[in-house]
Image (tube, rainbow, N blue to C red):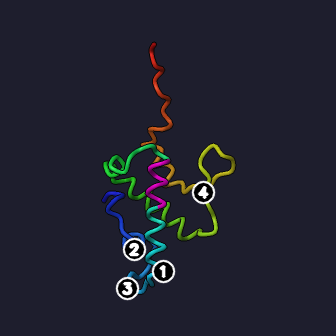
Amino acid sequence: MTTSALTYEDLANYLRMETDDLTETEVASLDAFLTAAREYAANYTGLTAEQLDEHSDIAVAVLCVAGDLYTNRDMYMILKGTGNSYMNRTAETILNMYAVNLVPAEAEEG
């Protein structure tokens, strides 16, 4: 599975929710959490959406982050390096494997 193929039904199943019982508001919330989790994964790793899709395990990280956003709606994540932070450890481990924005750029010769 790829991150772009994840749907609110996938997130609902991950959260053990009955998809037939979801209200329109709940569906919209789950979609929003998935979008936020995808963007978080892209920003965290420095990968494009297409590059995220090349790694099926990143879909698991996206579900973990989206699940945390749903479960802990009153909490928020602070990006690394900005002070106190909270991040799902499973998501952090997977995303760290692909984070290209943490690799120092090669010095330009000139």
What is the spatial separation of the Cα atoms under label 1 and label 4, in whole angstroms? Answer: 23 Å
The numbered dot on residue 95 is none
Picture layout, residue 27 above or below residue 103: below
The numbered dot on residue 13 is 2
Residue 69, position in %: x, y?
54, 66
Mark before the other along the chain sequence, 3 or 4: 3
For label 1, the residue is 25
- Label 3, secondary structure: give it: helix
For label 3, the residue is 20
Mark before the other along the chain sequence, 2 or 1: 2
Q: Amino acid at mark 4?
A: Met
Residue 108, position in %: x, y?
46, 19
Mark before the other along the chain sequence, 3 or 1: 3
Q: Residue at x 40, y 44 (%)?
A: 47
Q: Amino acid at mark 2?
A: Asn
- Label 1, secondary structure: give it: helix
Picture layout, residue 24 above or below residue 90: below
Q: Amino acid at mark 1?
A: Thr
